[in-house]
Image (cartoon, grey):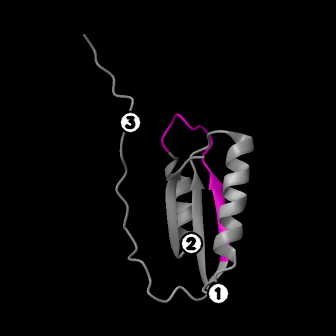
Amino acid sequence: MRVLSPVGERRRFAEKPPSSNARGLTIGLLNNGFGDKIAGMFFGRLQELLGVEPEVSEVRVWRKPVFTRPSPEQLIDEVAAASHQAVVGLCA
């Protein structure tokens, strides 16, 4: 018998410690890709709330292509390179 795991392979990546001074920082949000309409409203509102913080200069949202699969490494690298701080695994 062959048993398959639905989890997939996990990638290890460097964690960035939270900054006590977030002035001028870009915050990245990675949408897991589930639910277009509701997710759009959720991430739009989250961008709005974070964007009014004086320390935050930009909030960017990425979306993984298939919600049932792990994020492609290229996407994770892009989010990490473009963001000072990021939240991944968000799903509305």
Q: Residue at x 73, y 52 (%)?
A: 41
In the figure, residue 52 lies in which quadrant?
bottom right
Q: Is residue 5 above or below residue 60?
A: above
Q: Nearer the viewer, residue 8 or 25?
A: 25
Farthest left residue in view: 1
- The reply, left or right, for residue 33 in relation to residue 84 is right
Q: Is residue 21 above or below residue 66?
A: below
Mark seen at residue 81: none
Residue 61 x/y as whole percent:
65, 60
| SS label for mark 3 | loop
State the CA–CA distance, disc 2 to disc 1: 17 Å
Residue stretch rendered in magenta on the structure: 58-70
Residue 17 x/y as whole percent:
38, 76
Q: Amino acid at mark 3?
A: Gly
| SS label for mark 1 | loop
Q: Which residue is mark 2?
A: 83
In the figure, residue 56 lies in which quadrant?
bottom right
Q: Earlier in the sequence, mark 3 or mark 2?
A: 3
Asked if the stretch drawn in magenta spans residue 36, the answer is no
Q: Amino acid at mark 2?
A: Ser
Q: Which residue is mark 3?
A: 8
State the CA–CA distance, disc 3 to disc 1: 39 Å
Q: Which residue is mark 1?
A: 54
Q: Residue at x 68, y 66 (%)?
A: 47
Q: Nearer the viewer, residue 75 or 5?
A: 5
Q: Earlier in the sequence, mark 2 or mark 1?
A: 1
Q: Amino acid at mark 1?
A: Pro
